[in-house]
Image (spheres, helix red, strand yellow):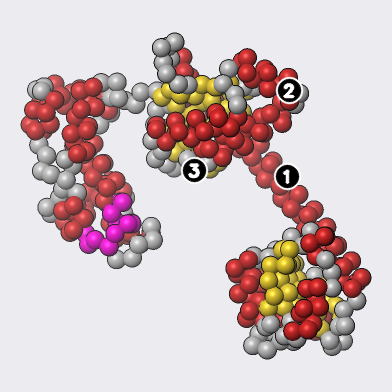
Amino acid sequence: MRMVLADDEILSLQLMEQVIDWGSIGIEIAGLAKDGIEALALIKNTMPDLLLTDIRMPNMDGMELIRQALLIKPDLRIVIISAYAEFELAREAIRHGAQDYLLKPLDEDVLLTLVQGIRAQWLEQAEWEKQQLKLVRIAEERGMRDRLYAPVLTERESETITDKFRLTVIQAQSNTYNGHMLREQNSAGLSDNLKYSICNSLGAFLVKELLFEHHPGEWIAVVSGKATHEQIRQAAEEALINTGLLVVVGISGERNDLKEMPTAYNEALAAIKKRTTEDAGHIFAYPERGEHNPLIQQAKQFITENFNTDLSLEQICEKVNVSKNYFSTLFKKETGMNVWDFLSEYRMERAKELLVSTYLKNYEIALEIGYENPSYFTKTFKKWVGIGPQEYRVQHGRKA
């Protein structure tokens, strides 16, 4: 528990700091303040759990400090200290959120008992919040398990994840998992330890921290579609080292709707099952649409390397050495979109990056991504993103 002390009388402030061995009862002094303004700045910077403050101070008195401090940290516990037996003032302080009121000169035993009581309440509240969070996580995990077996979701449920995602299935090989179980003799403890290690490694890529044990020895993580296979592989390998288990990892294709959870799960399992004894490593990705076709991969690479030029279908087909009709049909079949939609989507993703990371104007971004006509760029951006470039820039934190 962290505590800030505030008093305009230096000797009184030092006495409060030194009269009790705060560390021995689990209290850390986050800072000392000589007036309300200093105390408020400390509260903003350190976010303490307890404030002991004099009620009469220059610049900002204790009453105003209470009001402003609780706006910053609504769960802050506050004790008012004063040399004046002004009980109306004490009642007003408590009405505004103070927990208690002490008179100077401070009685060491009374102060110690009061702070210990407040700390006990704080610990109880923290434990309650921890349990509530655990219940929420259990409910979320149960919901995610249900989605694996119930593809038909309500519209509201399908909106809980709005970005593209991949399902990552982590399976422990039975011999090492059973060995861990024998040593741990506690399946819940083992599961929690493994989840902690996997969460630490995959945390940056987890969608809404969704990671759960599907059944003993198999964990499922919902991973952001923005993460590349290589990033997922590296994170998963780190988790394997930390757990000490021998596991295999399957990564599904990219999905954008929770209704596709069963499909994504089956893809991740298929990726694991397709491995052969010659495969190196323990992490396998399900091929994205078109990934298994080298011609499509070559075409995609050529498009993304030349996206900001005046590309033509003839140039692309010449590069991959096939006819336009054959290529157009194959590209649509393998990727689910035509080649111009693929190019437009890639350009729009690049435009979004430039809008939030640079101060380039619309016409400059248009030229940067291959559009000579800024109006056409704006129209295309709105079609793909749903809002105009400037609105997107403002919503994502970069001002024009």
Left or right of 122, for residue 343: left
Q: To which residue does mark 3 refer?
A: 204
- Indicate which disc, 3 or 2, sits on the residue closer to the N terminus: 2
Q: To which residue does mark 1 refer?
A: 131
The residue range painted magenta reads 352-362
Mark 3 vs mark 2: in front:
2
Give how far across and how far down residue 319 sits, in percent. 11, 28
- Using the image, determine if residue 167 lies above or below residue 127: above
Mark 1 vs mark 3: in front:
3
Mark 2 vs mark 1: in front:
2
Give how far across and how far down residue 144 sits, in percent. 57, 32
> Marks 2 and 1, Cα distance to the nearest angstrom?
27 Å
Quarter of image, res 19? bottom right
Q: In the rendered structure, find residue 183 and report the number of the disc placed on it.
A: 2
Q: Is residue 69 visible?
A: yes
- Using the image, determine if residue 129 lies above or below residue 238: below
What residue lies at 55% left-to-right and 28% top-to-bottom? 240
> Marks 3 and 2, Cα distance to the nearest angstrom?
31 Å
> Callout 3, which amino acid?
Ala
The residue nearer to you, when weighing 318 against 259, is 318
**Which quadrant is home to the N terminus?**
bottom right
Give how far across and how far down residue 237 sits, in percent. 49, 30
**Which quadrant is home to the C terminus?**
bottom left
> Callout 2, which amino acid?
Arg
